[in-house]
């Protein structure tokens, strides 16, 4: 609880979900943890959205993602709060979730690593900016999680992340406050 109000517990994890037993292993890892949302990057998964054991919801692409992929796992207690889900690309997706705190846009992200062309990275940030601008117009709070393949303010890649956070008044949160 923070200020008498429940906190949304969000985790971000790189997890290749291509093997059939991988989701069972991940659910076992989550057992006993307090969680509401898990944002996956580097999933390489194309199983589409589905309901998992205990009625948790997995939002994922129907398209093959051999070297990228993002998905969002939502705890079953929030499934009736989902207002919209969109798979933008094999590197970005989001859900709009209505909670007691209002509408929250939850974004899973997986930025291209240094082996990709800089133009690919710019396209990733362009799409992320569009997602955030639309969320701002809807007056959503925003949570972004994933793998940005950079270090904070380190080189041009880190500067892009820092600039995006400054532009949308986002703050970095790798640990509990």
Image (tube, grey):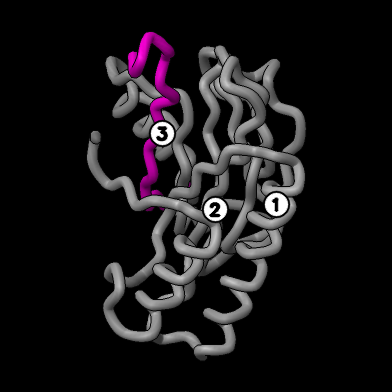
The mark lying in front, picked from 3 and 1, is: 3
Q: Earlier in the sequence, mark 2 or mark 3?
A: 3
Q: Earlier in the sequence, mark 2 or mark 1?
A: 2
Identify residue for label 1.
87
Identify residue for label 2.
70
* Disc 3 residue crowd, few under 14, some 14–19, many 20+, Cα 10 Å: some
Q: Are marks 2 and 1 in contact (CB under 8 Å)?
A: yes
The mark lying in front, picked from 2 and 3, is: 3
Q: Earlier in the sequence, mark 3 or mark 1?
A: 3
Which span of residues is magenta-colored? 1-17
Q: Residue at x 50, y 42 (%)?
A: 143
Q: Residue at x 24, y 35 (%)?
A: 177
Taking 130 as reference, is 118 left or right? left
CA distance separating discs 2 and 3: 15 Å
21 vs 30: above or below? below
Taking 145 as reference, is 90 left or right? right
Taking 13 as reference, is 32 left or right? left
Instruction: Tell me the quarter of the picture where residue 24 sits.
Output: top left
Rendered location of residue 49, percent (x, y): 68, 37
Residue 10 marker: 3
CA distance separating discs 3 and 1: 19 Å
Rendered location of residue 31, percent (x, y): 32, 18
83 vs 163: above or below? above
Label 3: state its secondary structure.
Answer: strand
């Amino acid at each position: 609880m923070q200020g008498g109000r429940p906190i949304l517990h969000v985790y971000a994890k790189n997890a290749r979900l291509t093997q059939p037993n991988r989701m069972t292993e991940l659910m076992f890892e989550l057992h006993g943890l307090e969680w509401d949302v898990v944002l996956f990057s580097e999933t390489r998964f194309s199983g589409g959205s589905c309901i998992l054991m205990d009625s948790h919801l997995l939002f994922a692409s129907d398209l093959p993602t051999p070297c990228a992929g993002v998905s969002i796992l939502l705890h079953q207690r929030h499934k009736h709060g989902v207002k919209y889900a969109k798979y933008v690309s094999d590197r970005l997706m989001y859900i709009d979730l209505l909670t007691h705190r209002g509408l929250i846009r939850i974004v899973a992200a997986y930025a291209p690593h240094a082996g990709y062309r800089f133009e690919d990275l710019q396209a990733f940030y362009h799409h992320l900016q569009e997602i955030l601008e639309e969320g701002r117009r809807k007056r959503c709070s925003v949570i972004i999680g994933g793998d940005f393949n950079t270090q904070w303010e380190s080189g041009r890649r880190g500067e892009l992340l820092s600039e995006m956070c400054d532009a949308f008044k986002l703050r970095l949160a790798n640990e509990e406050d």
